[in-house]
Image (spheres, coloured by chain):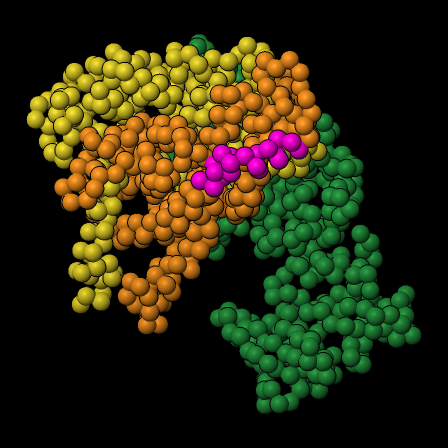
Chain colours: A yellow, B orange, C green
Amino acid sequence: MNRLLPPSHRLPGFILAHAALLAGACFMLLPFVWMLLTAIRAPDEILTGGLNPIPRSFHAVENFSGALAQAPLLNFMLNGAIVCAGILVVQLIVAIPAAYALAKLRFRARGLLFALVIAGLCVPIQVPALPLYLALAEFNLLDSYFAMMLPFFLSVFAIFLFRQTFKTFPDEIIHAARVDGVGEFEILWRIVVPSAFPAIAAFSIFSIVAHWNDLYWPMIVIQRLEYAPPPLGMLFFTSSESGASYGVLMAGATIITAPLVIVFLIARRRFVQGITMTGIK
Amino acid sequence: MTIASASAPFPPAAKRQGFRLSGEALGTLFAVPALLLITALILAPLVCLLALSLTDYEIGAVSIRWLGLGNFEKALSDPVFRRSIGNTLLYVALVLPGGVFLGLLVAVLVHGRKRSRGFYEVAYFLPVTSTLIAMAAVWQFLLHPKLGPINSALKSLGFAERAFISEPELLIPTLAAIGLWNLIGFNMVLFLAGLAAIPRDLYDAAEIDGAGGPVNRFLTVTWPQLAPTTMFVAVTTSITSFKVFDTVAVLTRGRDGSEVLLYAIYLEGFQYFKMGYSAALTVIFLVFMLVFSVFQAFQLDRRVHY
Amino acid sequence: MLFGLTLGAISKAFGTTRVLDRVSLTVEPGEFVSLVGPSGCGKSTLLRIIAGLERQDDGTVSIGSRVVDALSPRQRNIAMVFQNYALYPHMSAFENIALPLSVGRLSLPERLPLLKYLSPRRARIMREIANEVEAVAGQLKIEALLARKPGQLSGGQRQRVALARAMVRQPSLFLMDEPLSNLDAQLRVHMRDELTDLHARLGATFVYVTHDQIEAMTMSSRVAMLDQGRLAQFGTPIELYDRPATLAVATFIGSPAINVLAAHSDARGAVAIAGRASGLHVHALPDQALSLCVRPEHLRLARPGETPQLLARLRRNEHYGAERLLHFDLAGDSARSVIVRLAHDENAALGGASETAIGLAFEPQHAHLFNAEGLRVEALGHGTSYRTAAQ
């Protein structure tokens, strides 16, 4: 009877698999659980250390208000949102037409563009960072949203991904649209783009997660706290250890981490789909 | 029927613009913004970088001297830089096998679950979405010698407590463990996609051919079928771990024992403003990345289809 | 209003491959013309040139009396139905059908998200469009499907939506590119019927591309066959069947295919097949290799006492109910086989079947002769005489 079931459902294997997965899950979730527990603990209880998971007194209000008072956390997140939105919009506006041209149009520069895109895939942001920093400094553009966004306006990865997607779009439908009198720009934005929605959504998630969490570039171009995105803000926050107790720090970490985690819990399928489609972190 | 223009043979030419862009003009028009940005954001900086790497340029310096390959010679004989290369490679050597193996293991186990699959997916994936900087601060607290629960647990089990974030020889392993924590869920999702693509009949055939049981099934079907996914995951993991920076910036600030390549570039270029030297280090970094990335670009070409 | 179509010496090459070579033809207003030919003959390219999706290297396209070479597809006011239907995947059936109208009647801002609500006349135009879409949907009996997306429709339903999108514009010309080839066999026969009805009802001019000679034969008023980029023959289906102008036309039209036999004319022009007299003469072409073609229904078993034109061994006997097909291997040339088509009740004395060679015969006036270039050659010995069909 047992042989008819998939092997993983046979009892010993079933228990073993769950035991292994649960142990792993504990390791994965430990920081989150401890972060939340510490964020609601009183300072004296934290200082005694120990393994007691249940806080003796509820200190959440003090910790969270303390975190918000000590660092402009909401401002960091607003900065993050502005930067992510600006980057994404320009990336899409630049990449979609280029990808469409690569996938569906014949023109002389096509081979050159495609070669550059492929080559660009091999160059991480840390490589052009230095010259771009010098250029921004030259034009007095450091410490601005623009400085944070500039290197990411072009995503060769987006061009590549969209090209692959557009290539699968039937030529016939484009011809039908031309016969129906739809102009070339409209064909792209009203007919091709909507049908590539899964790829565009996947890329958008990839782009937002990457730039919301990016530390390297903001750390280079931003000195002033009022422009700091969440990771950089968090870095200032942790280093100004002066008064910040661990309870307050954990409350701050909770606030910074919450937006993406909440979005992930809501749109889990899209996240997973996005990663399997792009395969890049 | 009703609309005159619909039954006339040709709509008035003025109504819709008469011009039609040829493929050549339209394609060029669509490609120009991307070409300009590639030039401005990748090609030109790359040329500058190569030029800078041959000079002793520093911000605020009065004169620039041509050094030729001097920066590279200096880097290769600099013990700190050599340590940072060594540490980075050690970090990759720890994260790469661990990330691939554990990602695969978790994926295979999760793949067999029905009702609990959603929970495990969320649990393992959560670290990927969370902001690493914030979570690094949490890890710092978890690993705190006095206040952290991990040391408390060690103590209650009778072990000596360890200062994970200050003992030099523990730094890279600690960073690698956090790196793994951050990465496993991501690799799990890639492997799950690979597993979903394996046709069911292969397992049936294996069962009929006598290769039943979890181990046999894994060896005859799962593992060979996942080979391309595994290659891809391995390359992606190498690239990600080679770029380790965030946890170093928060936890150790590159202090003794935790020097890594990107942090060295950051320090030389943007803290000490030795642009020429930092550019040379970047070129070395780029060479490493190219080796990984060329691999990846080739695989992407085969991968992105759905 | 009805419009005809005139093609004047259309040529087109892709790189060094010539796909169309001086194709000229005239489609009368209200006609149903099929473009047929084997794949790669250039028929789809020709259709796309008529549509304005492709530009010809040479020659002119006229719709009605107007040369349309400089006009965009939209300006030509043609409608096109595609092989894979080419429905916009993210739009409902209604939106698909309405698109050609909204593009024509609304300005660009009126079609943009949000901005469109600013236009005072938009609501009225959209109502008109909706009425027309529903009228067309009613004609094709797809009113109930208008809210669905293409992904939720079956092949036949998608085909109807594609037709509705073509009809709603009341175009001067309908172009169809193998519209039935993706349907299953039964539905294809049914849609053939519906298209013929539709053509009769609309009275519009249809140009229909297909590689299926049965579709071309059954639906069209005239058939244009293309062969290697050239117009091989243009005429009614029966003309193509009864008097093929080239060997390619003869072999392409008709199912089962026409029997092609290697023949030879002697010094006096008498045509023989494998040394046996055929009863045909070509005085103008002595001593030549020829192809002699006979349709399966014109081939019969030789009567007792008659001198057969062919000797063959029976290989297979297929019953189709109303008719039967006898497959023979030619004696002395087993590589060549011929098919004889007999009515169900026709008796055939097949004797000892495959052991002995059986004599086959045909009436000389039913045979078609083609020269080495594949062009039709007129033979004497018929009652009638045809002109040599130069292309």
Front in this rendered view, residue C230 or A273: A273
Q: In this view, does C216 lie above or below B24?
A: below
Residue C4 quadrant:
top right
Rendered residue at 67%/37% (across/down): A111
Which range is magenta?
B69-87
Front in this rendered view, residue C71 or A225: A225
Quarter of the picture containing the C terminus of chain A is top left
Rendered residue at 39%/44% (across/down): B95
- Tell me where residue C85 appears, x and y as whole percent: 51, 41
Rendered residue at 57%/37% (across/down): B77
Any magenta on residue B83? yes
Residue A97 showing in the rendered view: no
Q: Would you say C269 lies left or right of C339 here?
A: right
Residue A140 quadrant:
top right
Q: Is residue A2 above or below residue A100?
A: below
Secondary structure mostly taken by the magenta-highlighted segment of the chain: helix
Rendered residue at 15%/45% (across/down): B157
Q: How many labels does the image show?
A: 0
Q: Is residue A114 above or below residue C337?
A: above
Any magenta on residue A199? no
Residue A50 quadrant:
top left
- Tell me where residue B195 appears, x and y as whole percent: 36, 52
Quarter of the picture containing the N terminus of chain A is bottom left
- Tell me where residue C375 appears, x and y as whole percent: 80, 59
Residue A108 showing in the rendered view: yes
Q: Is residue C89 above or below residue A153?
A: below
